[in-house]
Image (spheres, coloured by chain):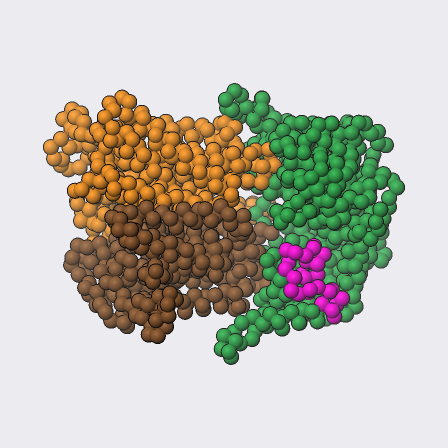
Amino acid sequence: MKKICVKLLGNDRTQFIAIPIFSILLSLIVGMIIIAGLGKYPLTAYMNLLQGSGLMPKPAYSAYQGMLTDFMSFLNMLTPMMFAALSVAVAQKAGLFNIGVSGQMLAAGFVATVTVGYSEMTAVIAKPLVILIGIVVGMLVGALVGFLKYRFNINEVVSTIMINYIVQYLTSFFINTRYIDEISRQSRAVSRASRLTLMQVTVGELKVDIPLCIILAVIIAVLMKFLLDRTSLGFEIKAVGSNRNAARYAGISVGKTMVVSMMISGALAGLAGVTYYMGYLESIQPKVLTDTGFDAIAVALLGNNNPIGVIFSSFLITGVTKGSSYMSAASGIETEIASVITGLILLFSACSAFIRYEVKKWKTELEEAERRNADVKNNH
Amino acid sequence: MSEEYIIEMRHITKRFPGIVANDDVSIQIRKGEIYALLGENGAGKSTLMSMLFGMYEPDEGEIYVKGKKVHITSPNYATKLNIGMVHQHFKLVSNYTIAENIIMGMEPVKKVLGLFPTVDIKKANEDIRKLSEEYGLEVDPTQVIEKVNVSIRQRVEILKMLYREAEILIFDEPTAVLTPQEIEFLLQIIRNLRDSGKTIILITHKLEEIKQVADRCAILNRGKIVDVLNVAETSTKTMANLMVGREVSFTVDKPPARFGETVLDVQNMTVRNQDNFDVVKNVSFQVHRGEIFAIAGVSGNGQIELADAIAGLMEVASGRVMLNGEDITHMPIRRRTEKGISYIPEDRQEFGLELDFTLRDNLALKSYYKEPFSGRGGVLRPDEFEKYGQKLIEEYDIRSGQGTMTQVRSMSGGNQQKAIVGREIELQSDLMIFVQPTRGLDIGAIENIHKQIIAERNKGKAILLISLELDEIMNCADTIGVIYNGAIDKIAPAETLTMNQVGEFMMGVKSK
Amino acid sequence: MSRIIIDGLSFALPLFIMAIGGIYSERSGVTNLAIEGLQGFGAFVGALFVVLTSGTQGTDSQVIFYFAFLFAMIGGMVYSLLHALLCVKFKANQVISGVVINILAMALTAFLTKQVNKSVFNQPSDKFQLGVSSRFTVPVLSDIPVVGAVFTNVYPFEVIIIVVAVIAWFVLYRSRYGLHLRACGDNPHAVDAAGRNVGKIRTVAIMVSGALSGIGGMCFAYSISAQFSESIYVGYGYLAIAAMIFGNWKILPTLGACLLFGFARSAGYQIVQVLEKPSSYSDLVMTLPYILTLLLLIFFSKYNRAPKALGEIYDKGKR
């Protein structure tokens, strides 16, 4: 048992990928046990999840629907999650805990909605402008958090929570007094031209939603990876994140680096905001913060705060969420089981440090034992 | 089983991942003696005593206390067996009072309204006051730990043992942070304790102390017992050779100094800490090319802040700092480095290194942003990091598991220090500040670093050496400044001062 | 004026009890962002007890009311063991553990609520209806001008909270356990050397924080929301953490912070009513407590001192 574990998980080079996969498998197994406990077939349920996210064909489709429809709608949901998780990851690299992604998303989404979303601009101007506004608004909020931390030593956990509430109530006030749609009790829908997802586009025989920013999200993930690993700014961010005192000693301006990282984090949250409120959705429900910003913390964790890892982890978590409604319809399991499975995945990945530690211990134990065996042999 | 030994450790072996810390070690300690454990850093002294105190359990071997075989599974149990230990790093709660620290775990309890048990702090204060007077270790039980100095903290640790009625007292490197006079006082306390019937185990690598107080001495080298000696019959030289396992030369080769022009000129500098308290008071001195200017002082007298202020880590409240004739008083840290300051900080893990970074990233920690490491637009060149890393590893003999890609956290303290020293010397700055450069290193490594410091001085660099070890200062310095309570009142050529004189200035006994 | 006090207290006190839970955990050295999840899970267990014993229509029974709080405490406490397990035994990153526990709490309670409603009551619903707790007014005392409001229209749980808070204060600052607990947050090695088990002390501290959060969650379920549903997760747990940090990890200043939140909130609602503005204006005044907090923090965070060992994973071997 120990030997197998050490062999599979003990290699230093492959550990960074082996351990997350191990945690995921472990949680899927626990999920299977729960589903079986409810008297359903676990494998069918998991297959339903994949079908729901358009990763496997369903047995039947209604008119204009197909696997591609499901998959594109999955990507539509994935886009904001990827940006949000990148936002958390970058802040985390600088040792900052951005728990306010949801608030930054709302701020950016709201400003873009009322400026561009309700204007008459044509798509060519409106769409880039929405993205730009998203980036700028997010960046400003991030800068404020960074500044409060650097200048007044205000814990970023507290300030981002406070800003979450402020944004939530402030936008709710404006939506309710000015932009409300009386029937849906949400803000009025934004113009088609400004939306970052092309809705119901006919592709062959199918109608699909095309999230324009998914490519941008992947490109930005790669850019972030480059920024962190191969630039002096990235070096500084990581230095500040892993030991502030040593970074200061090395001549790095800690305050500036923190503000800059929070600005990058905020900008990414802003992107998540506009792709969420003006792509995945078209309106804003007043006084509600989306869960995306909080789930993103966990997604970033699962991806080990590595931008490339985040691509995969957001794919996985969003896939489970997206597939859950089909699973519920097809096999009669509550959709909430999907979030339970997500929770379990996160729970087990939170233990990854412990798994690594245990594996290392076993490894040295085995090595010691082997050495002793060898000694005994030599003596004979 | 003979009754004459109060403690016997037999054939003790303890392994940690990768190393054997104790290899078949046996020691026997008599009641009422002062028994010293001598060895270099990493020889396994502390590990052995940690097992006696129940912090680890041995992999093999047996422990007997008062003739009875015991399994000491926790410090709690060790305390029950009347064993106490003063650790090298004090284990004190900084925001608690002295009394609270001492009684913790064995609090006197009184019941409020005859119902609710509470800690009886009044009784505790009284008990502690009595106890401290009894052993001549005066403290004020109501003072908070973070407000008292190191030597008082050590007394608190000793009182903690006495409060628990320990009969076997283990001291782990107790003199490392004390002045000669404080050491004198401590050794007297240790003698008194023995005379009142306690058994003392003294872990140290300082031969002088052993010579002064110990009755017997066990020498450890690389986890094994080399010899057990009667101190009175053995010379320090013999002990040193046994400890290191080879001939040791006590003196450092140092050609006479040739001072050049002034590099560092500190003028009436005052530094305030966070609580707005003056920690460096109106200090003035110069360091010239080819000079080692050493600052002696008891820990906590402002020497760290002095160094931090010159390097730019702390703000200067008033006065000026000049480097090669240029005012750098308010210059950012990076500009100072570029103008020519190298700084080996006291706390290498908290300041000197990014422990989670690779060795090569740490070696370039102060130059990553410049050519050749970084090109236009701040894009890094990993090849250059690698090349530079290889070069320094070779030149400074930095040993690590995976070469340039080793995570620094996994390296030994000595090699971490070599990495810092290498990085800072390689900057080839005009001024090099060394703070406690040899703390926690073994004799071989210490010798090496001293040689490097002197080599840089011979090359014409200005060296500011700050150390708590008087030996180090006496060995290396050309000029000695003594800092006491934030002020430097005595500056004199090294050859005009004796060790004891310096010690007296450090205590503030002599003025001017 | 008296409305401000009455509503302010009924919001501030549940917040306060959760914040005390946070203080226990963090003063023992364990970062606790899990309060949000702990209060929700506690409230779930309390509400589950209520609906199982008295059906889905809600009830006025006082016995059930008090038992609901007992079960909420137990629920929060049991669930907090997960945080203890991760932080103490598995040496996980404490911030991450907290967030994960919140997400899992939301998922689990939502799932179980639906499941229970379906299988026990045979109705598709995602909430447990509870109704609002009855209130009482203390005669004589309530007639005192201004201060009398404190004794008017009081929820019974406010009394519970005050009693528990006094006990919590006493234990933290006067008992042996409290002495050990606070020491763990400053230098756990000292506690270990004194022969106390750091892991055990911290586990108990986390359990206390779970139990107290459970009380807080149950209060909100019985007052503001009158039900248990996903609406319990509106971030009051995070607000309690903010109050705790604002209160510098000390019980009395934290009470002050909670009262500030509570009164600013109820005063805001009153102002909107007095000015006869539409209710959406209350959103605008609702930002006041948070803006006020940020402004106050600008002046006070200089003096903020987190427990020294907070968030550090305690490893015996390391010295």
Q: Colour of chain B?
A: green
Q: Residue at x 28, y 62 (%)?
A: C222
Please state, as top left, top right, bottom left or bottom right, where the N terminus of chain C lies in the image: bottom left
Asked if one can make out residue B420 in the rendered structure from this viewpoint, the answer is no
B432 sits left or right of C312 in the view: right
User: Which residue reaches farthest bottom?
Assistant: B114
Position of B333 with respect to A88 (left or right) is right
Residue furthest top as drawn = B376
Q: Quadrant of residue B284?
A: top right
**Residue B332 placement (x, y as % from top left):** 61, 32
Relative depth, front residue between C264 and B502: C264
A22 to the left or right of B28: left
Please say if B58 is above or below B419. Answer: below
Q: Is residue B263 magenta?
A: no
Residue C107, horizontal then vertical, whole percent: 29, 51
- Residue projecting furthest to the left: A63
Give the total number of marks visible in the rendering.
Answer: 0
Q: Residue at x 79, y 68 (%)?
A: B195
Question: What color does chain C have in the rendering?
Answer: brown
- Return the x and y of residue A344 as percentages of the image width and height: 34, 49
Residue B110 image offset from top left, x and y in percent: 56, 75
Q: Is residue A229 above or below residue B236?
A: above
Question: Which chain's colour is orange?
Answer: A
Residue at point 70%, 58% (across, down):
B152
As rendered, which of B390 and A233 lies closer to the eye? A233
**B6, B97: nearer the viewer:** B97
Q: Residue at x 54, y 63 (%)?
A: C180
Q: Which residues are magenta?
A: B132-159
The question of residue B137 being in magenta is answered with: yes
Confirm whether residue A286 shows in the render. Answer: yes
